[in-house]
Amino acid sequence: MNTTKKPTLSLGLMLLTATLASCGGGGPAPVTVPGNPTTFTVTATGSTSAQLNWSAVPDATNFTLERKTNTGAYAAVAANLPTNTLTYSDTTLTASTAYTYRLKASNTAGASSGVERTVTTPAPGDADFTLSAQPLALTVLAGRSGSAQITVERPANPEGTVVLSLEGASVGSGPDRIQGTFGGASGTTLMLNVGAEVAVGPHTLTVRGRNGTVEKTVQVTVNVERWAVVDDDDSSNNSNHANPAYLPDSAADKIVRAAMTAAGRPYDVFVVPTGTGGYEPDIPDGPSAAQLSRYSGIVYYSGSSFATAMTNDDLASMSTFVDAPGRKLIVLSSAVLRNSVGGRNQLQVPDERYRPFLVTRAGLAQTASGETIMMPAYVLAGEADTVTQGLNVPVAARSFRSYVTPAAGTQTLFKEGDQVIATGKTLTGASGSSKVIIAGFEINDIAQADANTLLARFMTF
């Protein structure tokens, strides 16, 4: 019987065959051609420009953008655009022309078939525009913000986009600069943030609009305010002015500070030290002219004190303050007026040392001390067609007051009966642009609500 012996595989050969089969050849996975972007939009942004946007493509390493007219062949507009570039602005077009764009994604395996979009540029428009601002001038407290609305008017067939910017010596970032940003739904609301250390007074800012070669400007003036209170009422905190534990303690202290807060005016306080007694030159001076120069507005009060109200240096400092452009000084003091005539109760020209301040700058012709014996309660009656119109402010009994005669051009603001007790002078000082209010009543004898209203009116004088 014949038999045929079958060949057999060794165990080692079988293991080698199985290992090779499991490895699949050992090479890397093949790279495949990327797909097209799923989103691709083209929008004409003017007669010679278009904006293109597209979505990212996985596995792509770059994009190629091509363009043709409907009668021409494709030509590359941008090649090898990185994959994180998903937008392109084409500004080399011709008006009233149809264009087709093709976008391809590529990698080492090749390029996608491409996706196409067509756009037609419009006929040439008008790039002109006009700028206006509302308001043209605004007042902003240092450390606060304000806004102005910029209006951009375009022709019926506008061309291009107007880009706004803000310029000026005070423009920038930091505590001594005014920072401006454009926002709102149409990007034309100018928000102004005034640094806490910006100098007081007017700052001229220029809003510039650009559209291609067309430029227009409009100016906005920002009047920066900073207020200070001069506490010269000889109360306990004045006697201990260097000790922070001594808080404002008198009625005048509390009323004035509360009224400033109610008016929305942040303020610094100068507490004038109490002297050892007597009159000029023994009593201490208040803030110097250099100290006052940081402020646009000053509220000075002396309460019921007479002996300490304004030294010669104080009168000079107040005059210097008023001489600067656009300052506002509010003096709430029967004492200053009483002392200006040595306590006499007949209206007369103030003593010589008071004249540069009270006559030249405050616009008073005469001053006098009021009644000092009975001192009954009375009412401050506001004057028609002034900031005090409609006000009738009760003043408590035993309250000192002084009277004045306003010179020509000085407004009467309050009367007690027929006697003038408060005045306001505009366009004064060396600059001819400051304002001074002199009030011969004591703020500490007025109810808080009335003081809030009165001081708010005075600050808008």
Image: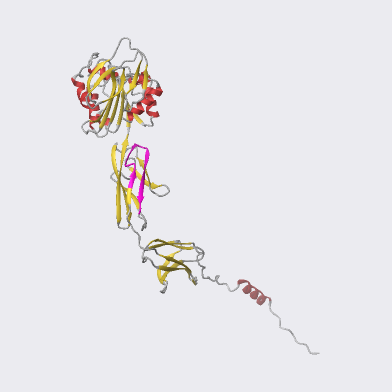
Q: Quadrant of the N terminus?
A: bottom right
Residue at screen point 30% across, 49% down: 217
Q: Is residue 240 above or below residue 320?
A: above
Residue at screen point 60% across, 73% down: 24
Q: Nearer the viewer, residue 81 or 21?
A: 81
- Residues in magenta, as a range: 132-154
Q: Image quadrant of residue 170?
A: top left
Residue at screen point 35% across, 28% down: 457
Q: Position of residue 268 (x, y in %)?
A: 34, 30
Q: Position of residue 13 (x, y in %)?
A: 65, 77
The question of residue 284 being in magenta is answered with no
Q: Position of residue 143 (x, y in %)?
A: 36, 37
Looking at the image, what colour scheme do you see? secondary structure
The question of residue 153 being in magenta is answered with yes
Residue 250 visible in the displayed image: no
Q: Image quadrant of residue 17?
A: bottom right
Q: Quadrant of the C terminus?
A: top left
Q: Nearer the viewer, residue 345 or 83?
A: 345
Residue lying farthest to the bottom in this orientation? 1
- What secondary structure is the stretch in magenta mostly built from? strand
Q: Position of residue 41 (x, y in %)?
A: 46, 62
Q: Nearer the viewer, residue 19 or 149?
A: 149
